[in-house]
Amino acid sequence: MKRGDKAVVVDDLKNLLAEAKVAMLADYQGLSVSELTELRKLLRQQGIALRVVKNSLARLATKGTELQELEPHLAGPTAMVFGKGDPTLPAKLLASYAKTKPTFRIKAGFVEGKVLAKQDALALADLPPREVLMGRLAGVLQSPLRSLLVSLQGPLRSLLMALEAVRQKKEQGPPGP
């Protein structure tokens, strides 16, 4: 590969890394070309890109960024998976694919600039989607407010019940002699 071609590849990788919310590094050793093509197709259907990269060029692309911590994981055959949407989706797809192909394994990843070790990247696959997490957060935030509302309504309800009892007593008239 010529020096100019390498610069283009490095720039392309830098752009992909800058645009991606999540990226995963995987070892694809032992996969046939058709199996790798099948994985690419599966990922592409979800808007996720897979690139087989030369480790030296990937090191150049991450050098001087917060992603240079990925350098120890850039050894052996490396495929980079880039996602722009839900950060858990690439991890889930790769983890499920790794279950069917024992030679395929996740090396590391990053989410929104934070580098993840292998076990953290795999834990990301176990997280529910963002929408579910946001719903759970809304429920947790709503619970104390609801309790406060019920607590504030209690004395008011007692006052209204006392006033209603007084009104009913007055309607019955004065007690007889």
Image: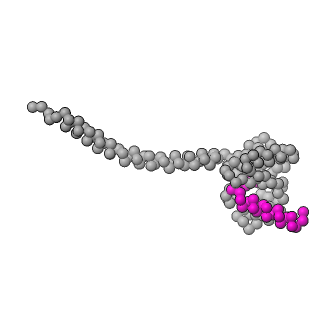
Residue 66, position as x, y percentages in the image: 70, 64
Residue 121, position as x, y percentages in the image: 70, 51
Question: Is any part of residue 150 visible from this angle?
Answer: yes
The answer to which image quadrant residue 80 occupies is: bottom right
Residue 13, position as x, y percentages in the image: 78, 60
Residue 21 inside the magenta-drawn segment: yes
Residue 166, position as x, y percentages in the image: 22, 39
Residue at the (82%, 57%) spot, across then down: 53
Question: Is any part of residue 108 visible from this angle?
Answer: no
Q: Is residue 81 left or right of residue 133?
A: right
Residue at the (9%, 31%) spot, across then down: 177
Q: 134 or 79: which is nearer to us?
A: 134
Residue at the (41%, 48%) spot, across then down: 148
Q: Is residue 134 left or right of residue 164?
A: right
* Quadrant into which the N terminus falls: bottom right
Residue 102 inside the magenta-drawn segment: no
Q: 119 or 62: which is nearer to us?
A: 62
Residues in magenta, as a range: 1-25
Q: Is residue 154 left or right of residue 110?
A: left
Residue at the (48%, 48%) spot, across then down: 142
The answer to which image quadrant residue 115 occupies is: bottom right
Q: Is residue 74 left or right of residue 86?
A: right
